[in-house]
Image: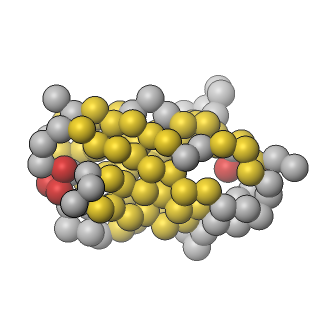
Amino acid sequence: QVQLVESGGGLVQPGGSLRLSCAFSGSFFSLYDMGWYRQTPGKQREFVARITSSDGTMYGDPAKGRFTVARDNARNMAYLQMNALKSEDTAVYYCNADREREYWGQGTQVIVSS
């Protein structure tokens, strides 16, 4: 059974940075594609970024040029480095693990506000 726990969210001023972490509990972390999604009230969950089991990366439009996704297979961790944050980045951010089936974390709140 896979469990995901996000951390690193919080309140940050516009233009600031945050690094989100996702701790993976379970087996064969290196075989999972790891993704980040976000959601605001009343809206559908939105794709942010993904890193595959072979370290390929892809980004949603809001993340391009500002966010970087990474993973550490030795620590069973995935990360989302977010720079140049904007108020519209305010959301709950979710970690996703995908290999034959998907798993989700409980989310971490990011608030970008002055």
Q: Position of 69 compared to 110: left or right?
A: left
Identify the residue at image location x=79%, y=58%: 14
Residue at x 70%, y 66% (from the top left corner) = 84
Residue 3, relative to residue 23: is it above or below? above
Left or right: 66 in relation to 27: right
Q: Position of residue 108 (x, y in %)?
A: 54, 37
Give whichever of 2, 46 is nearer the camera. Answer: 2
Q: Is residue 47 visible?
A: no
Q: Position of residue 92 (x, y in %)?
A: 58, 36
Q: Horizontally, is 84 left or right of 21 in the view? A: right
Residue 85 falls in which quadrant of the image? bottom right
> Does residue 18 appear left or right of residue 53 in this picture?
right
What is the residue that sits farthest to the right in this orientation? 114
Furthest residue toward bottom = 65
Q: Residue furthest front?
A: 75
Which of 43/112 is in front?
112
Quadrant, the N terminus: top left
- Residue 82 seen in the figure: yes
Quadrant position of residue 105: top left
Does residue 29 sit above or below 57 in this rendering? above
Q: Position of residue 46 (x, y in %)?
A: 52, 44
